[in-house]
Image: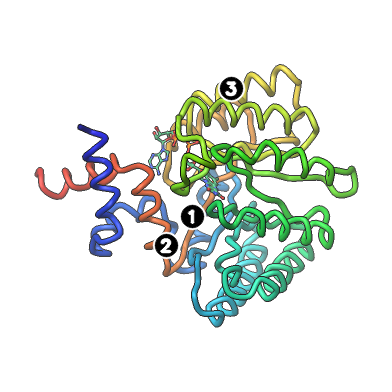
Amino acid sequence: MTNMINKAIATVIPYCPKKFIWVFSKKYIAGVSVQDAIKVSQSLNEQGVCVTVDLLGEFITNIRQADEHLEEYLQIIASFEKAQIKGNYSLKPTSFGLLIDPEKCYQNIRGIVALASKHKNFVRIDMEDAQRVDQELLLYLRLKRAFPNNVGLVLQAYLKRTQADLEELLKEHTPDSPLNFRLCKGIYNESADIAFKDGEKINRNYLKLLERMLCEGVYVGIATHDQALIKGAYELIDKYNVPKDMYEFQMLYGVTPKLRSSIVADGHKMRVYVPYGEDWFGYSTRRLKENPKMAQHIIKSIFVK
Ligand code: FAD
């Protein structure tokens, strides 16, 4: 019954008034301006947490928006470096025209990585839906050739193909050009043909991939709020005596802050993903679909006084 209610909520979410979605979103979005993102990042830095900032606005349909995103990212980097924020940058290739003009998308992102590398900083390519994986793998490898230490990729444990992708990518792992991954479960709604749907299977695959990465000396951003995965990661770190500068934990802004603090208190590096921007709607509806219980809480707080 609860599952049916959650499914129904997930279906109607995209049609909800923006005002309603904002009630939920403000907890997860740093704000609409780069100054908002800096303020949130400074506060996280003070808590001993570094950040990765992301300008919202994926799956653009007009190539002019790609230029706007490029300009804004260059501004973000200039502003964040000036404010001496402890953090790096995350971006989604579909924000830069991957669906419209892949070469332009590459050139745009190359410009961003070039500026980050001037500041000895780093750009993470988020992984989007399954149809984009081949293109985003190639994009990453091309950027890595140009900027061997300034770019990383995300891999998703729910995809059945990820194990094979990892084995291929490991061939590109060299001391001068090391791989650098964020490992997450995956957030898009993929079909059972290509993705594990069962939570336990996803977790098993996650830990298998993490073990392989840690054993191969790949730097990993362990991106999860799942206590079972965090426990599993702790065990692997202990088992292989992984140095502290070879991994970090990562969480989303606004999600499980207590768990985040406990990981920091245990002495591990933590990075929080700080999304901001005018285009918060798509990001928020995805988070709501992922966790419809949140919508139930909001509905309750609106109707049950
Ligand atoms: P879950 O089992 O989903 O969550 C564990 C617990 O965390 C839940 O029980 C709940 O208490 C809490 N929780 C999780 N999410 C929420 C939420 N939204 N609101 C409130 N509580 C919540 N996915 C991609 O496909 N591509 C990416 O590039 C990508 N980048 C990411 C970057 C970071 C730093 C993180 C943390 C996640 C990223 N994700 C990305 C999303 C990821 O794939 C998962 O969908 C998301 O992290 C939830 O999975 P989980 O491991 O936290 O486990």
According to the picture, the residue beneath numbered tag 2 turns out to be 31
Name the N-terminal-most of marks 3 and 1.
Answer: 1
The one of 46 and 69 positioned closer to us in this rendering: 69
* In the foreground, 14 or 258: 14
> Percent x, y for residue 63?
56, 80
- Residue 164's place in the image compared with 229, above or below, is below
The image position of residue 231, as x and y in percent, is: 55, 22
SS at circle 2? loop
Cβ at disc 3 under 8 Å from ligand 1? no
Looking at the picture, tell me which residue is in the foreground, 205 or 116. 205
Mark before the other along the chain sequence, 3 or 2: 2
Q: Residue 253 location in percent, x, y? A: 47, 48
N-term-proximal mark, 1 vs 2? 2
Residue type marked 3: Gly
The label shown at residue 232 is 3
Of marks 1 and 2, the one in the foreground: 2
- Give the CA separation, mark 3 to mark 2: 34 Å
Residue annotated with mark 1: 40
Compute the Cα span from label 1 to label 2: 9 Å
Q: Quadrant of the C terminus?
A: top left
Q: Could you say which is closer to the camera, residue 228 or residue 127?
A: 127
Is residue 20 something that shows in the picture?
Answer: yes
Q: Which mark is residue 281?
A: none
Q: Kindly tell me whether residue 48 is visible in this rendering.
A: no
Q: Are marks 1 and 2 in contact (CB under 8 Å)?
A: yes
